[in-house]
Amino acid sequence: MLCPSRLAKLRPLPRPLLAAARRHRGVDLRCAISSSPPPPPPPPPPQVRLRTTSSSSTGLGMPSVDEEECGDFLPWLERKAGAEVSPFLSVGKSAYGRSLFASKSIRAGDSILKVPFNVEISPDDLLPEIRSCKVGNVAKLAAIVLKEQKMGQDSEWAPYIRCLPQPEEMHSTVFWSDEELEMIKESSVYQRTIDRKVGMEREFSVLRHALDCHLPEVSKDMKFEDFMHACALVESRAWESSKGYSLVPFADFLNHDGLAKAVLLRDEQKQFSEVIADHNYAPGEQVLISYGKLSNAVLLLDFGFTIPHNIYDEVQIQFNVPLQDPLYEMKLYLLQRHCLQITHNFGISKCPADSFTIKEVRSAKGKGTGIPQSLRAAARVLSCISLEELNDMEEEATQNDGRLGRRPLKNIIREIQAHQLLLSCITKLIDQYKASAKLMKPTGCPASKRDGIRRLMACELLAGELRILKSAASWLENYTTNL
C-alpha cells in the first residue's frame, strides 16, 4: 500500500573554501552575480514567508527600529568582532517579526554583510566533557544557548540572546499541541514531528546527565521545554559549517524568500560569512535571502512557517509489498538485490529516508517527470502475479543496467495494471487529504492569533501536498488511458 512517509534529513557535504552555507542547501552566489550594470528592482516575489510572527510587530514591510531590545545589537557585535559587520543593514520589526532592513541604498552585487567566524557560536565553545556527549550537533549548540540564557546579563552573548524569539513566537510543529498536530496527520510532517520530539527527549536525558556533572548551574531547574526551545532556535537559525552547526549572529535575522538568489556564503580561508545582494534595495526595504529550495514540509518543521503555492513542495510516500501477497518473499528479495532499500515495516524505497519523493508533474501529457522511476518500477514489481513474470523482469535488469523494472512491461495490459495500482493508491491518499481539508474549514473566529496562524500553515501544507498528488494522478490517468 501507499502511505505518507517521514521526511529525509539532508546530510552535510564536503565544503570548498568558499561555499553557500546551508540551512539545508544552497548555491554559490558568486557565479550568479555578473559585473554588468545591475537590473532594476524586481516586483515583490510571491514565495516570501518569514520565520516568526511577533505580537509587537508593525505593518507588512514597514520597519520599526527595535531600540528596546536590539537597537545596540549591531554596534555591540562589531565591537566584539573587531571589524565592521554591515554598513548597509539595521535590525527592525516587520509584520513577521525581527528582520533586517536596508539602512541605505543597496545595489546588486554589494557585499552587505560580513560576520567573522570569531563571533559565531559553535559546539567548539562547549567544555570537552559536554562536547563528547553522544548527542547531535543541534543538541550541543542548544546546550550553549541554555548556558548563555541561564547567565542572563552576565553572559558575553546577552545582547544576542535577548534578541532571539520566545517559545510563544515560534511555530515549528514541535510546539504544536496534539489537537493542532491532528490537522496535518495525513502529511509526513506529523510523524516526523513525533520522531523529532522523541529524539529531543532522548538527547535531553543524555545532556542533562552531563550538565549535572560538569555544569550544574545550567542544569538546575532546567526543563525539557527549555531544551526543546533551545533546539528549535538552533534548527531554525543555525547554518551548517566546518564545525557542524554554527549560529551566525545578525545574519540569522535575515528572512526567507524562496525565489531569492542571495544566500549566506562561508569563506573558510578568510574566516567570515558573507551575503551578497542579488538585486537593488531602497532604504527601508526588508532584505531577504534564500534558505534553499525547501518544501513547506521542511519549512514548517524546521523553521515554523509555510509559503502559499510553494513551487518546491513535494510529497514523501511509501509503497509497501502487501503481507498477503503470495509472491511476497520473492518480490522483497528482488527489490533488495537490485538496490531498493527495504524498510523495517517492509516498505520499499530508493531514497535514504526509506521513501519515494513525488514532485509536481507539470504536464499530464509529458514524461511524468516528478514521479520517480523507482516508484513506477516498484509498481511493476508489485503488480506481477507469477514467478515467471518476476524472473523475466530480473533477467531484463541483469542484461541491462541492473535496475529492476525501469522499462515499460512488454505486456501492455500488465503495464496498464501496474500504473493503475499506483494510481489507485495515490487516489486514496488524495481522498484522505481532501477529508482533512474539509475538517479544517473555519467555523468561526480562531480562539487566538496563534491558532489562526497554525491553522493557515496546516492548510498551506496540505494544499501543496494535495496539489502534488493530483498532478501525479492526472499523469497516471493519461498514461494508462493512452497506452
Image: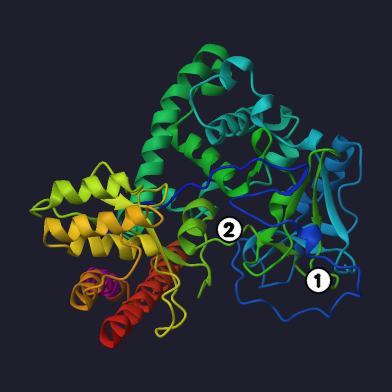
Gap between marks 2 and 1 measured at Cα: 24 Å
**Residue pictured at 81% horizontal, 69% vertical:** 284
Which residue in the protein does label 2 denote? Answer: 52
**Type of secondary structure dominating the magenta stretch:** helix
Drawn side of residue 365 relative to residue 238, left or right: left
Q: Amino acid at mark 2?
A: Thr
**Residue pictured at 88% horizontal, 69% vertical:** 107
- Residue 432 among magenta residues: yes
Drawn side of residue 441 relative to residue 154, left or right: left
Instruction: Residue 382 in the image: state x and y as whole percent.
Output: 20, 60
Instruction: Residue 336 in the image: state x and y as whole percent.
Output: 29, 45
Q: Nearer the viewer, residue 387 or 48?
A: 387
Q: Secondary structure at mark 2?
A: loop
**Residue pictured at 67% horizontal, 32% vertical:** 243
Q: Nearer the viewer, residue 140 or 454?
A: 140
Say if 244 sits above or below 291 in the image: above
**Quarter of the figure with residue 49:** bottom right
Identify the magenta region.
423-434
- Residue 57 among magenta residues: no
The first of marks 2 and 1 along the sequence is 2
Instruction: Residue 122 in the image: state x and y as whole percent.
Output: 67, 32
